[in-house]
Amino acid sequence: MNKENTAKAEKLKTIIENSKNICVFTGAGISCPSGIPDFRSADGLYNQKSGYNYRPEEIISHSFFVRNPELFYDFYKSKMLYPDALPNKAHKYFASLERMGKNVSVVTQNIDGLHQKAGSSRVYELHGSVLRNYCTKCGKSYSLEHIVNTKGVPRCTEDNAIIKPDVVLYEEPLDEAVIDGAINAISNADTLIVVGTSLVVYPAASFVRYYKGKNMVLINKSETSYDYLASIAINEDVVEVVEYLEK
């Protein structure tokens, strides 16, 4: 890290040491070091040539899932599932704060389940999780492994209905209980650390405005439109910042 970001990271280290209630708000950038590409960067999913005649946003919409489940699952399995991905240093660091006795909540836009794999116990998944899947008729649950190992469209073993990932698709609302938990976690935090998100996906991005404290920290490779609201804005890879915090 450069001198300016090192100074900011040192300040962040002090803030974390003095905080009891910490909320970590994460986006795709925290999982990129685990080998999961983001959506909106130059190399992200939305800027890749998908090989399909539809935009990625259209394919992962509710109406497309209903209309064309075969193509939906072809895209979903090849572009959005990373069953072998493991938590990186950043996921593990925020989980470790919990073991140190901090009251830590994680609000994430990610669907990869890596925060839980790292050991975080209070995670609000705004956009659902690829780890959970259910029959659209009877509600029977299925694992990620079942989806990965099924050829074509996964169907329920009970009634042959289509299985749907428990992921919030375009045109679908966020879960109200998850929203309430996330807003409560953000509004009651001493410190809010926003990591790896450009804060352009709504309504999720607007949730940071519920924070009432003085220590709002943004860690993202590129600048965001919310940087001016932050007490500290570090434009750096989160793993490099975490490596400094752990010294």
Image (cartoon, rainbow, N blue to C red):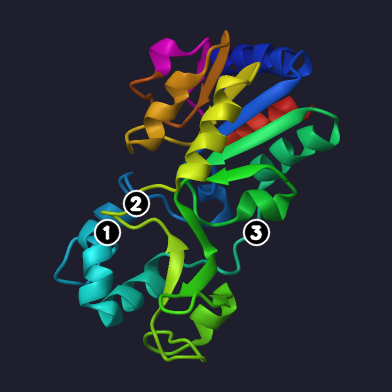
Would you say residue 21 is visible in this rendering?
yes
- Which residue in the structure is indicated by mark 2? 44
Residue 104: image location, x then y, percent: 71, 32
Q: Residues within 10 Å of mark 2 (few under 14, many from 20)?
A: few
Marks 2 and 1: in contact by CB < 8 Å?
A: yes
Q: Is residue 225 left or right of residue 193?
A: left
Q: In this view, does 105 lie above or below 190?
A: below
In this picture, which residue range is highlighted in magenta? 227-237
Q: How far apart are marks 1 and 2 (CA)?
A: 6 Å
Q: How far apart are marks 2 and 3 (CA)?
A: 19 Å
Q: Which residue corresponds to mark 3?
A: 86
Q: Which mark is residue 48?
A: 1
In terms of depth relative to the viewer, which is nearer, 91 or 51?
91
Q: Which of marks 3 and 1 is nearer the N terminus?
A: 1
Percent of width and height locating residue 174: 40, 47
Classify 10 Å Cα crowding around label 1: few (below 14), some (14-19), many (20 and above): some
Whether residue 237 is visible to the viewer of this picture, yes or no, is no
